[in-house]
């Protein structure tokens, strides 16, 4: 998706907690269908929050158009994200009314996601020195 486009997301643990709440109140939720999400952020906002949590700059960019043109599946996914079909349309305010525990991304990064970010940063390749430099 484009850096300025909003995309909804949810913590995996929140999915389980919602399911528990729904199963625990079948009279309230029977026959209802609703989208779930815990937060909605643009790619740029996602990068800002990751940068803050990591203590270093983390950028966000859309996959290159040439790659999207070469890979049929990625290209179709990009179209679905760009036209909004994959970005999510959950009513976050209504969900928070029913499930106040839903984590926003920054709270996830500070809590259950902290060790995952740390692991990802440890595995991330370090930038290579410029080609014209000698080691």
Image (tube, rainbow, N blue to C red):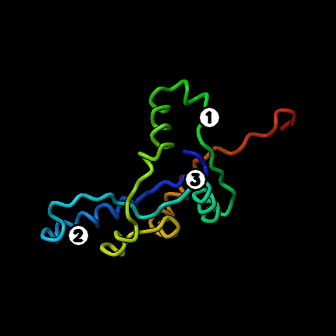
Residue 25 pos. (x, y %): 16, 71
Mark 2, residue position: 21
Mark 2, secondary structure of its residue: helix
Q: Residues within 10 Å of mark 2 (few under 14, many from 20)?
A: some
Residue shown at 50%/38% (left/top)? 78
Where, quadrant-wise, is the N terminus in this rendering? Answer: top right
Q: Is residue 129 left or right of residue 100?
A: right
Q: Is residue 77 left or right of residue 24?
A: right
Residue 12 pos. (x, y %): 36, 58
Mark 1, residue position: 64
74 vs 120: above or below: above
93 vs 56: above or below: below
Q: For residue 47, which quarter of the picture?
A: bottom right
Q: For residue 95, which quarter of the picture?
A: bottom left
Question: Is there CB contact under 8 Å for labels 3 and 1?
Answer: no
| Distance between the alpha carbons at the discs numbered 3 and 2 | 30 Å
């Amino acid at each position: 998706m484009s850096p300025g486009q909003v995309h909804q997301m949810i913590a995996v643990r929140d999915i389980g907690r919602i399911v528990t709440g729904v199963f625990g109140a079948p009279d309230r939720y029977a026959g209802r269908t609703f989208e779930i999400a815990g937060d909605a952020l643009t790619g740029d906002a996602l990068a800002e929050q990751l940068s803050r949590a990591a203590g270093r700059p983390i950028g966000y960019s859309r996959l290159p158009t040439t790659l999207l043109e070469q890979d049929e599946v990625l290209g179709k996914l990009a179209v679905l994200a760009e036209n909004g079909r994959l970005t999510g349309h959950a009513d976050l305010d209504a969900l928070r009314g029913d499930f106040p525990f839903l984590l926003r991304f920054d709270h996830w990064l500070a809590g259950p996601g902290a060790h995952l970010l740390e692991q990802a940063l440890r595995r991330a390749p370090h930038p290579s020195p410029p080609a014209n430099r000698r080691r």
